[in-house]
Image (cartoon, helix red, strand yellow):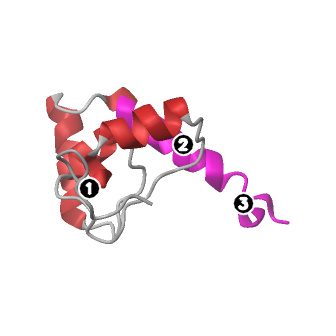
Amino acid sequence: MSSYNLVNGPNTAQNYDLLTTILRKEWGFQGFVMSDWFGGRNAVDMVRAGNNLQMPGMPNQKVAILEAVKTGKLDEKILDQSVTEMLGIIVQSPHFQRI
């Protein structure tokens, strides 16, 4: 979970260096990252940084992300990667596997 804290400038929820460079690339984390409730200020930057789930999931966040993809401000591949990481965890869940 990313937090409210500012680390070297941006909120941790919007900090690519923390969520992608360190957490995923250096430490090999393969799960998904969720924000603390209202833990970031910019939904698009949160996706770019490596945040997969934005809490509490406000409608304006969805609109901002979709608009950014439509206008080319957010590469669709980045959004696809975020969704892939979430689905990777979901398909492993006992509920999904009907265990």
Q: Nearer the viewer, residue 69 or 39?
A: 39
Q: Secondary structure at mark 1?
A: helix
How packed is label 1: few (under 14 Cα within 10 Å), some, or many (20 or more)?
some
Which residue is rendered at x = 58% and y = 41% of the image? 29
First along the sequence among labels 3 and 2: 2
- The quadrant holding residue 97 is bottom right
Task: State which quadrant residue 1 falls in.
Answer: bottom left
Q: Quadrant of residue 15?
A: top left
Residue 79 x/y as whole percent:
37, 38
Q: Nearer the viewer, mark 2 or mark 1?
A: 2
Give the amino acid at mark 1.
Lys
Residue matched to label 2: 85
**In the rendered view of the protein, which quadrant contains the C terminus?**
bottom right
Q: Which residue is mark 3?
A: 93
Label 3 – label 1 distance at C-alpha: 25 Å
Which residue is denoted by mark 1 in the rendering? 62
Segment tinted magenta in the rendering: 78-99
- Residue that sits furthest to the right in the current view: 99
